[in-house]
Amino acid sequence: MAARSRTITAAGALLVAAALGGGAALVGAWALGGFHGSSTTIREFSGGNSLPAADFRASRRLSIHDIWRRSFPGVVQIATTSETTAVDPLFGFTQRQKQQGLGSGFVYDKAGHIVTNYHVVKGARSIEVSFSNDDSMKARVIGTDPSTDVAVLKVDASSRALTPLVLGDSDSTQVGDSVVAIGNPFGLDRTVTAGIVSALGRPLQSEGGFTIDNVIQTDAAINSGNSGGPLINAEGKVIGVNTAIETGDTGSRGNIGIGFTVPINTVKDAADELIRHGKVEHADVGVAATTITPTLGRLFRLPVSKGLLVQDVDAGGPAAKAGIRPGTTTVVVSGVSYKLGGDVLTRADGVGLTAAAQLVDLIGAKKPGDILKLELYRGSKKLSVKVKLGRRSTPATG
């Protein structure tokens, strides 16, 4: 069976994620796009036509044109220049070559910070940002976080010339919500596409070799060059940063209606840390859990109808040291596998857990060494456990 691949949506050379580690190869050929040495330019984008599936005229929602009009002054185009070393196949000598890359981004604040994807600026020797009024200026990298595919740039521009986009709450996003993507696909600046949120909670492997949890899936058209651009809801608020596309069995770089977006809550946590400290230290609990629905609660005869069912626990990790128990028996329901027999998490730091994304966000807001208080059921017995969070190592950035 042909392998399916997911492609990082920056314009530039593509590389197969299997080259990054055997783990990626187990789930198929994941094509990760990269700018291997590049210069960065930023421009703002303009609108386009809506898709019939997306309803932007319902109560308290903006039209696609209204969203574009409010947002495009804050969306930028990023052009990068990098250098690579090539070996002559005949004579064996090496020579340096320049590569150009193109991506998207958006204004994060009045201080001149620009948010984009890490893979857009990876290895860049120079970066240029272009705005909607065709103004271009050099940008410098404040920090990058390969684990979440987030990078923060900075331009020296007057605050009056900057239009930060309004950030939403990705935890409140629901399947079927109408969304708009604005970016620079294939160098076609000022492009807007529309669609819906197709699914939530998708895992996506980052270039750092880690899995980004709770990624948003959308059918809004996303292509190479859209990387780093915003996904915006019907209220005109950014709910994520467009990162990758599913290319299907053909390996085509074109859009087939399946795109992936890093949730803005994840992006905001990383961006704020990069602005303050230039790096991100990720806390780690070492547990994988799935959301319990009322249907699953009844079907599996769980003690609660809402919470998280622990699936796996990292050996020797923080959760394992605290005594958290994983599932032991695998069952399949409607084609989906679940592990039963593990602990059921109901609250974290006093917050009722109704979705796996909540636990991810709570841990993301903490530092290594912080204590996370979990309330759980082990069978019918209710317990309270304190977990000392560990540190997830982050590879050096290029």
Image (cartoon, rainbow, N blue to C red):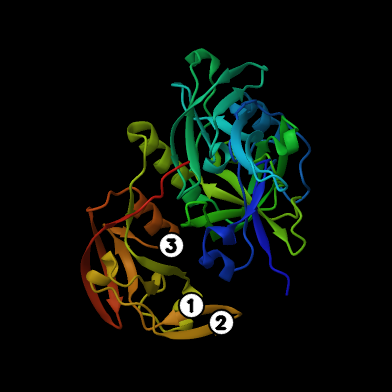
x and y, in percent, of residue 197 in the image: 63, 53
Foreground pick, 5 / 162: 5
SS assignment at label 1:
helix
Of callouts 2 and 3, which one flags the residue occurring earlier in the amino acid sequence? Answer: 2
Q: Is residue 126 above or below residue 304?
A: above
Residue position for label 1: 296
Q: CA distance from mark 3 to mark 1?
A: 15 Å
x and y, in percent, of residue 136 in the image: 62, 18
Q: Amino acid at mark 1?
A: Leu
User: Among all residues in the image, which is located at the extreme front?
Assistant: 91
Q: Amino acid at mark 3?
A: Ala
Res 71 seen here: yes
In which quarter of the view is residue 4 placed?
A: bottom right
Residue position for label 2: 333
Of callouts 3 and 1, which one flags the residue occurring earlier in the amino acid sequence? Answer: 1
Q: Is residue 49 above or below residue 176?
A: above
Badges 3 and 1: C-beta atoms under 8 Å apart? Answer: no
Q: Estimate how packed mark 3 is, as few (under 14), some (14 to 19) or many (20 or more) residues with alpha carbons within 10 Å.
A: some
Q: Name the quarter where the N terminus is drawn.
A: bottom right
Q: Is 210 displayed left or right of 81 in the figure?
A: left
Residue position for label 3: 356
Of callouts 1 and 2, which one flags the residue occurring earlier in the amino acid sequence? Answer: 1
Badges 1 and 2: C-beta atoms under 8 Å apart? Answer: yes
